[in-house]
Image (cartoon, rainbow, N blue to C red):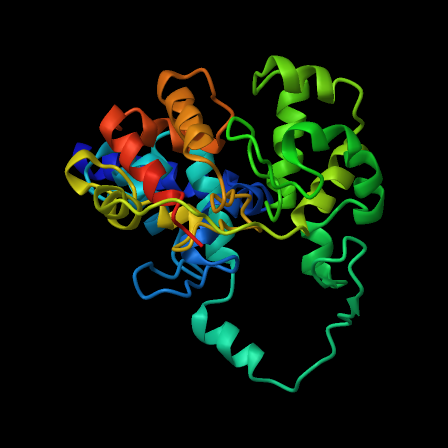
Amino acid sequence: MKKIIFSLFVALSSVTTVQAADANAGKEKAAVCSACHGPTGVSASGMFPNLAGQNDAYIIKQLTDFKSGARNDAMMAPMAANLSDEDMADLAAHFSSLPNVNEQAAASSGPAESTGSTVAASPAGNVEIVSSTPAAAIYQGDVAAGKSKSAACAACHGADGNSLAPIYPVLAGQSANYLAKQLEDFKSGDRKDPVMAGMVAGLSPEDMHDLAAYFAVQTTKAGTGETNEAGHKLYIGGDSTREIAACIACHGVTGKGVKQAGFPGLTGQSQEYLTKQLVSFRDGTRNNDNNGIMRNIAIKLSDANIEAVTQYITSLK
């Protein structure tokens, strides 16, 4: 009898957790999931499961098991490591509320409708800017205004965002929402750098979005470094024996990143800059990564690992 009562208590607790979950909050938190599972919970790769329409209690259990180690996966372990029970419930509520893959396929096969998308000439002169709802979400700022405001950035990052000095990052072609977040973090102190702190001190949120939009539409130069076999293995496959996730999960096969999710592009970055960031994540001096994803990975990397994977990244085109 006691066992039955206990089981009912656990079941009721689970229901309460699900009912208290916030699907809207889960949608915001799900940005980091879209690289593998798709922005609508339907994965473009057979390697990763569809989450759209999945049972919320099942999703919560899997995330809990990834966090505890009861279910092993080199990619999901660092993703789940810093999720709270509330985060898991919110994510589960969001994905369970989405139409499943069959429903999405049926909806997309219906009569074609105008999306209202138009193509405008690029103020930056390098790319076309699509004036659609998704594009507006990526480019919140004004590209032309950002170009005017970027003069102060050129000394370190280059006029078009392609830095010639290896100690400074390439900004060209970078995710706009990622760039805006870094500027916000430099200003708030969540990301620390004595040079950048002074540069962002007088920037408004509008300035940050304008600068981010301008650099996002510039063309990234291809990497010119030599490849590295050990680095290639880490980048493509990770290391399951040490629960190191593959870099491609967030940064893509060619290092272009995932703009909608705010995962940065790595193509064109110098080995010196990449090494500095991985070491900073490893020792905790940089800690503005979402859910500690990079810290959880970098802490498991040796100096040799970092040298190998950063060397490989410099070869990406």
Judging depth in this view, the residue of 38 and 121 nearest the camera is 121
Quadrant of the image occupied by residue 45: bottom left
Residue 25 drawn at (x, y percent):
57, 41
Q: Is residue 45 left or right of residue 68?
A: right
Q: Can see residue 1?
A: no
- Give the vertical position of 298 relative to 265 (above or below): above
Q: Residue at x 45, y 52 (%)?
A: 35
Judging depth in this view, the residue of 89 and 124 nearest the camera is 124
Quadrant containing the C terminus is: bottom left
Q: Residue at x 79, y 41 (%)?
A: 146
Quadrant containing the N terminus is: top left
- Give the vertical position of 143 relative to 280 (above or below): below
- Give the vertical position of 169 relative to 24 (above or below): above
Q: Is residue 23 left or right of residue 186?
A: left
Q: Is residue 82 left or right of residue 118?
A: left
Q: Residue at x 41, y 51 (%)?
A: 316
Residue 271 drawn at (x, y percent):
41, 34
